[in-house]
Structure formats: C-alpha cells, structure tokens
Amino acid sequence: MAAPRPWSSLHEDLLRRIILLLTCIADRVRASAVNKHWRLVALQNPSPLPCLVGPSTTLTESYRIFGRFPDPRPSLSAEGRAERFCGSAPGGWFVVASPHGRGHIRCPMMIRAAAISAAPSSGACVVAAITSTRTTMAFCRPGMECWTSLPAKMTARPNAQDLTYHDGWFWAVDSDDDLFCYKAELSTSRQTILHLAYGIGAPRTDMAHGEIVSRYLLPSASGADLLMVRRFISPATGRTSRSQVFRLQKAQEGRPASWRVYKMTRQLLFVGRACFKAFDTGHAGNPGYIYFLDDVYPGGPHQQNQYPCADAGGWGYSIPGEIQRCLPSAPPSDTSSCIWYHH
C-alpha cells in the first residue's frame, strides 16, 4: 500500500480550493510559507483584498494593493472607459453613470455615490444613490426605466456624504454624523420607500480651523456592526492627517442610539465613497489599519475636471498621527475618483 502524500505536495486543484477559502490574511501568509509549491498556488489565486482602479476615458488601470504593480482585472470594454464610477460591491460589480446612456437606466440627476443591496444577477437588487438634486436620494432596480425619488413627505439631508447597505436597510450619514435609513420596495406596479432617522452625534473632537471631515460607512468584517470612519484633512497641506472609527450602538432600554468609539482589533478597512470592505486579519493583537482613497473635493465631485490620486494611503490605529503613502501612484482621472475593485 502506497504511503499517503504529504501535505506539502497536495494536488494543485485541491490546494487551490483550500487557498481560496482562506479569507483571513494571516492564514494566507502562513499557507504561502509552507514551501514553493504552496506559495506558487497562492500567488496564482490572489487574496480577496480589493484592487485600486483608476478610471479614465483613455485607459482604465487597476493595481494590486501589495506589490504596487498593475493587475489585468477588471477587464473593461472601450465603451466602459468613459463612464463615471459611483460605487462598487463584492463580486466585481460597479455602479456607473454613463454619458452615452445605451442600455442604462435613464438618470437625469448627478449621482455622487451609489450602493446596491444584492448582486444584480440575484433578482433582489435595489440601487440607492446620493444625488445632487433637491431630494438627495434616489432608488431603482435592474429592469426599471427611471429612478424613484423620495416622496415629498420624506426629508433627506442635502449634506449626505456616504451610504452603505447593512441589515436590510440603506444607511446614509451626513456632516453632523446623523444617520438616515431607507428600505425601497420597487416594482412596475408599486413603489414603497420606508424611512428612519437617527439624530445622533459622535463624540466631539478638537479640530484645527478649516479642517475638513469626511465620513464613510461600512459593515464590520463580521457584519454585526455598522461602522463610521471619520477622516480629517489638514487645511495646511490638503492631505489626510488622521482618522477615527465609531460603531453604531442602536437604541435600547430607553437609551437613544449613539456612536461609540470602535477599537479596530484585527480589522483591516478599505474605505471610499460607496466602495468599502472590512476584513478580519486573524491576529488578536493586530491594532487595525485603514486604507483610504483620494475622494474629498471641497467644491463637490461634480465641479472637478480631474480627479487626482495623491491623497491616498494608510492609517494605523496604533499610531494615530502617522499616515503612510503606501498605495500605488495612479495618474489623475478625467471621469471619477479612484475606486476599490472587489473581485
């Protein structure tokens, strides 16, 4: 009877399946260190970490986060290169605004950011968008010919900064750290939008005169918590200087909802306008890390002729005042700011 093959020489197909199941970064690193065979298979089946995409009318380029070298994914047609990217989601999905309108949902408003409730192929997909119209929120689903705006009786803050889909609702955050929740049930015969508002504020922070605060929403790696990231841009340099992370504590036992300081142990966050993802690093002692994009424009995104990728980098929870310019340097875009590609 032949002796069993050692773990170090597993068949490539079986090993590939194992590698793809490793969503924890630390586990992938350990697997790659077994031997050359394991490392080769791991390199051929990259981690689920997102890529950095720089949209352009000429050539849309994609870069891997670690290694700073180009990545051939996603493969976009020439028609898709002129479109403005408004959001992304796992599975390689993008929400784009097209200047051509061929085969797209008609969109008369300016979309600033957009999120989806499920993959468009699932049949349960609803798209929510922060717009530059008076209502500031709009909804649609694949197959519909137009967007549905909020009913007149529903208010939406004109200063909404970001949105995400979490726990069955679309959540939007404004410049006062308040939350607005929406659930859209859309069909050709019926359109219903439910609305909730949370008037809450995060703990006060000392700020320099003219300092800009940009807010981002995303679910935690486990999906149990809704997180808000505050990003501070220095008025002197025009660059990110620090970040803060909070967790939503929902109302309970007579206590109102509130933002609580979130300790990012084991968390790796990728934040951007409606293009977010949180990962569990697997290290209990890991203090947490945030990667952010250059997507803050004092005059608003619709007033930009070019979208630079200069103020992008990383921030570590253990060293609050240190910003690392560690992301690949992409040329300015003429269509929209850089975006995370979640393959």
Image (cartoon, rainbow, N blue to C red):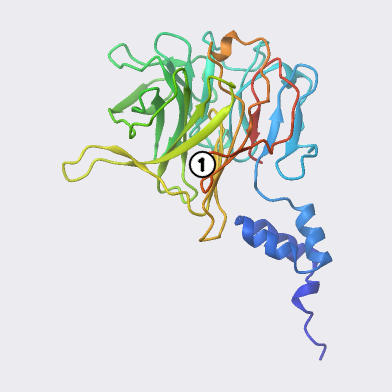
Image quadrant holding the C terminus, namely top right
Indicate the position of residue 341 as horizontal and vertical percent values: 65, 35
Q: Closest to the observer: 226 or 285?
A: 285
* Crowding near the residue tagged with mark 1, few <14, some 14–19, many ≥20 C-alpha atoms within 10 Å: few
Image quadrant holding the N terminus, namely bottom right
Q: Residue at x 77, y 79 (%)?
A: 6
In the rendered view, tell whether residue 250 sits above or below residue 24.
Answer: above
In the rendered view, tell whether residue 323 sits above or below residue 126.
Answer: below
Q: Residue at x 42, y 25 (%)?
A: 186
Q: Closest to the observer: 52 or 237?
A: 237
Q: Closest to the observer: 113 or 90?
A: 113
Indicate the position of residue 263 as horizontal and vertical percent values: 43, 49
Position of 170 compared to 48: left or right? left
Amino acid type at image mark 1: Pro
Indicate the position of residue 253 as horizontal and vertical percent values: 17, 46
Q: Residue at x 39, y 14 (%)?
A: 158
In the rendered view, tell whether residue 10 sits above or below residue 71.
Answer: below
**Residue designated by label 1:** 320
Q: Residue at x 22, y 37 (%)?
A: 256
Position of 100 compared to 4: left or right? left
